[in-house]
Image (cartoon, rainbow, N blue to C red):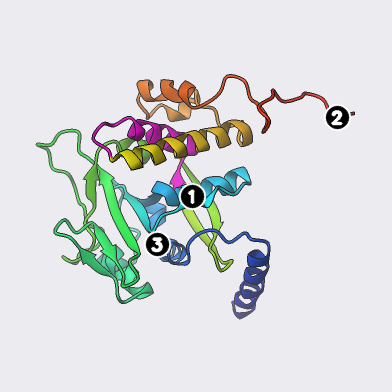
Amino acid sequence: MTSLAKRLDRMAAVNRALDLGRVPIFAARVLRALSDAHLTDTAIVTVGANALYAYERMAGVQIADAILETNDIDLLYDARASLKLLAPDVAATGVAGLLRKIDQSFEIIGKDGFRATNRDGYIVDLITPASKDPMMSRGRKRIGSEADDLKAVEIEGLNWLVNAPKITETVMDQRGYPAPMIAPDPRAFALHKLWLSKREDRNPLKRRRDEAQAKLIAELVTSRLPHLRFDDPALAALPRTLREQATLLTPTTRRDAAGQPPRLEPDW
């Protein structure tokens, strides 16, 4: 283990030199802590702008910083998942306890208790799908048993991301160290972002960013990941009307950087 740790330190420097480090350092530490606690195996996936780091790894590209810029990380909590496999200390302290092991300055803010922030202003949000029936019990929102753990806030539309296929990628933080990330299928992400961009009750600035991210990821899927099709039966968990909107994101004819249809033969 000591030898492997030293090798990781050496390779981290190589990754930095190759400009492979992309994920903010603190986000990567959160992901590693969640993985060590087996929370990503049973309950939590990464959504929001941070998921783009997984998609760019899949596609072998680097996304412009303007689209990636964010100072928080959104964690989608699937309240249906069993907690029986969690270590006792994690079950007791929950996400808030894990965050404080990384940085003791983390505090839960707001009366709803779904957001934690540290002294540097880094934010971690815990979110969960809204119940279809507001009169029914909405299930367990805390992962830990402590009263001061993060409590997931319900948000409409997240059922699609919970039920969509998931992808697992090893991303690199800005120091060159790896971190595991589980995120929704990029096609589900793109369609969900397109849906968000059309909501009248959403902040106009966020709507424009949602649309830009939806089109970007759809283009990456079309041009770099052709085996992932938007008419795939694996996306059946998403509403049909949502899947049909894929035509708004994907061009019928692929074109190169100059806007021309791709050549089918080499430039002999």
Rounded to the nearest angstrom, the CA distance separating label 1 from label 3 is 27 Å
Q: Is residue 133 above or below residue 28?
A: above
Hey, which residue is sitting farthest right in the picture?
A: 268
Q: Give residue 267's mark.
A: 2
Q: Is residue 59 above or below residue 115?
A: above
Residue shown at 45%/48% (left/top)? 51
Which residue does the numbered mark 3 point to in the structure image?
34
Magenta residue span: 182-202
Q: At which x and y percent is residue 194?
A: 39, 32
Q: Is residue 58 visible?
A: yes
Q: At which x and y percent is residue 249?
A: 49, 27
Q: Are marks 2 and 1 in contact (CB under 8 Å)?
A: no
Q: At which x and y percent is residue 254?
A: 63, 25
Question: In the image, 218: left or right of 256?
Answer: left
Which residue does the numbered mark 1 point to in the structure image?
66
* N-terminal-most mark, 2 or 1: 1
Give the class, few, some or many, for how many residues have Cα within 10 Å of label 2's Cα (few <14, many ≥20): few
Q: Quadrant of the C terminus?
A: top right
